[in-house]
Amino acid sequence: MIQFVAELLLPGWMGVVLLRAIGLRFCDDRIGYLAWMWLAGCLVIAAGLQLAMELHVPVSFRWLVPVALGGILSRIRALPYDRAASSHGRCYALFVAGGVGLCLLFVAAGMERPCIEGDEGNIWSLKAKSLLVDWPAGFAAAQVHNLHPDYPQCNPLLQVWIHLWNGAPDFVHFENRWIVQFCDVALFVAVAAALRRRLPAIAAASLSSLLLLEPEFQGLCRTAYADGMVALGLVVAVDAFLRWRDGGDRRFGWLAGLALAFALWSKNETMLYLLCAGIAAGMTRCWVAPQRGGWKRENLVLLVPAALVIANTAIWNARFGMKSDLLGANPTGKSMFALMAEQWRERVPAMFAEAASVFLSLAHAHVVFAVLLLGVVCVPRVALGQRLALPVIALLGALIGIHVVYVGSFLPLRMHLDTSYARVLFQLLPAALVLVAAIASDVVGARTAGHTAQRP
């Protein structure tokens, strides 16, 4: 019991102290806070464990470094905050609790199979074990067995946290998933809170239920893949960004920055999404709300956590010679761009067909992307207006970017699509849900205001 508390409650405490340092409290959003807390705690754990490794702390004492880091954060003077409490309603809270219970059943179902197969075993779990038994001398050599050695470290470091409490090198093959799986549970909570902020309870619950019914989400809850971590980081970043833009509350700007850093440290696809966001920011520069001063230095400071993660990953990969298969480290020896020039005639039509099939399928919640596109076409003044233009354009660009990557992949297209397409698209789905809700909320609000204005 003590071990279980240490494994799963210490991350919650670390998240609380980090959120407190940026001024966020439970009363700011009594549902969303639980998801933010878990995300923040995972960041502290991963950062503390990497620091412990770099300092060559003995394996049996490495868990002390994240705890010490949490203690330091608890001493930071918090940003000022508004004490006004938020409430989503008792019935909606009960719905979220039921959804969490269902997620936990999916998590428990993951105990059926050990974490030794597929990408969860051959990428994430393999690297986690290697960080414990091969570090530092044999780490680089051991990654020859890793399918994607250049992937960021957050997921493996979170599994290391569990291994430290269960003993290494006598590794566990089920419990190591827990902290990653709880990121998927937090994803549902974050989506439910973000939707309820913008929609009535029934509408928010209905859209949130799409996540619970999505096969890819259920699969992620059972495994240690990092795609759910990316989705969690992105949806919290979008939600927090919109809260910051709406009310000017800088605390949510910091939350958005931390969430973006979490997504960047989870999987490489986030670099593509960040590039799309940068392009979108350039395109919409003239639309940025003047009172937020989007390009001022004090706002760019919010991107420091993301910049640190990017630098850390780049330095780590250069240090150990980890290269990306998209840049030529594959059996063909060709980069994604060279392969794209060779394969586009064959693959572009196939990608259009695959996208149409998945976006219009009632077996997946990916129909949300089609709804978002419909919103852009039907209400462009809202979807591409001052408030929502940046995240909407960034997400649409990210969708295009994902398909471009598949066109330039060295893997056989059908096999690559069957094994990863719906799962990778899912990374963007929760954020798309929030943007659809924001568009719907703005449309209804504008019409209500118009009707009110016309009354005699």
Image (cartoon, grey):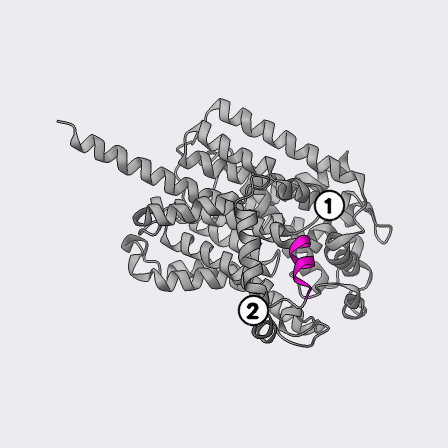
Q: Position of residue 210 (x, y in %)?
A: 55, 36
Residue 50, percent from left and from top: 68, 59
Tag 2 and tag 1, C-beta contact below 8 Å: no
Q: Is residue 18 left or right of residue 382?
A: right
Q: What element carries label 1?
A: helix
Q: Which residue is drawn at 51% across and 39% down?
A: 191
The outermost residue toward the left is 456
Q: In which quarter of the image is residue 266?
A: bottom right
Give me the residue at 34% from left, 52% from top. 384
Give the residue pinned by disc 2.
344
In the picture provided, is 290 more to the left or to the right than 158? left
Q: Distance between the residues labelled 2 and 1?
A: 38 Å
Q: Looking at the rendering, in which quadrant would you find the N terminus? A: top right
Mark number displayed over residue 177 = 1
Q: Name the residue at 83% across, 52% down.
A: 168
The amino acid type, in three-letter code, at marker 2 is Trp
Q: Which mark is residue 439?
A: none
Residue 104 position, x and y percent, is 67, 34
**Dominant secondary structure (helix, strand or loop) of the stretch shown in magenta:** helix
Q: In the image, which is nearer the foreground, mark 2 or mark 1? A: 2
Give the residue type at disc 1.
Arg
In magenta, the rendered stretch is 411-419
